[in-house]
Amino acid sequence: MRLKERLESVIKTLSDKKNKVCILTHTNPDPDAIASAYGLWYFLKNTTGINATIYYDGIIGRINNRIMVDLLEIPIKKARSDFLEKFDYFCLVDTQPGKKNNCLPEGKKVLMVIDHHFEEAGETKPEFVDVRVNVGSTAAIVCQYLDKFKIDIPETLATALFYGIKTDTDGLLRDFSSIDKRYYKKLFLKVDYKKLHMIESPELPKEYFFDFADAINSATVYKNILIADLGKAFVPDMTGEMADYFLRMEGVSLVLVYGEFRDMLYFSVRTKKRGKRLGKICYELTEEIGSGGGHNKSGGGVINTPSKNKEIFLLRFFKKFSIRLQKLKLLYTEHK
Ligand SMILES: [Mn+2]
């Protein structure tokens, strides 16, 4: 069945307006997850009349993402497990049933899965599954749905979707497809630039800069690999932010940044090199001790009980990338 027919079948399933629908993002949602949830919410509203509820768990950590939600008035709420009981249907965006990075209650009926991470064999068989690993953002996939049904995208939604595609593809430079490119260009004409600027360049709390200091002071290098420890991270997303930043360093082609937040160890990995499957690697590095995933050039995850598992994780990482521990050199003191 073609995409439009498959979506029409979902709309038919939801024909009773009394249906309670929950759109669920992954834990600690990023702009792509938030934007695609908002886009799907708008799609369902326009095609079925249903006012779905968007839920996330964890925290919206990054300042940019919090401003995105506030400024664009995105109706996303923090879930508590008992909140999720009342829904008839679940739609998952930027994640999948069976993945550890979402709080979908067990045995719940999943109607839609829209994602661009590699598929894991989940036990539930949703009616509508659209997982495209070659696409750079879930937001672009949702744009295609709105496009197929000729639904006009208002300015706030356009700004959210644009920011989602932009962040997940690093401005069409990393792991992107022709679909990301198409909608990035189309949305560009509708973006509220003032709001986008406020989202992208907000005032930052002092803690943000302290994490920078910790990252730079702790950074060690082996050949073209850089590893940095944030200690206690101010928000989980700091690892990704710092990893992106370090990847810009001359001579560095692979970066690992990790830091603790509320008794969990978060980490992000980035590479400049093509052909690396970091998502898969992060998945393997965290087996039994946490969860991980991602794409080709970017990945990350979370480790449970760091006091016990941090070392296991780091040793796995060193082994995977053939890093000789004795040869790891401090970046900054070396310079002084
Ligand atoms: Mn994504």
Image (tube, rainbow, N blue to C red):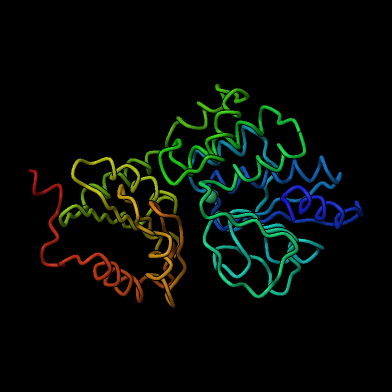
Name the side, left or right, on which 128 lies relative to 247: right
Q: Position of residue 54 (x, y in %)?
A: 70, 50
Q: Position of residue 165 (x, y in %)?
A: 53, 40
Q: Residue at x 82, y 55 (%)?
A: 9
Name the side, left or right, on which 137 lies relative to 42: left
| Of the pair 324 and 273, the residue shown nearer to us | 273
Image quadrant occupied by the C terminus: top left
Name the quadrant containing residue 282: bottom left
Q: Is residue 121 above or below residue 253?
A: below
Q: Residue at x 66, y 34 (%)?
A: 157
Q: Position of residue 135 (x, y in %)?
A: 53, 48
Name the quadrant containing residue 83: bottom right
Name the side, left or right, on which 301 lies relative to 106: left
The residue sitting at the front extreme is 1
The count of marks equals: 0
Q: Residue at x 46, y 57 (%)?
A: 294
Q: Position of residue 19 (x, y in %)?
A: 87, 57
Q: Residue at x 60, y 24 (%)?
A: 192
Image quadrant occupied by the N terminus: bottom right
Name the quadrant containing residue 95: bottom right
Q: Is residue 246 above or below residue 286?
A: above
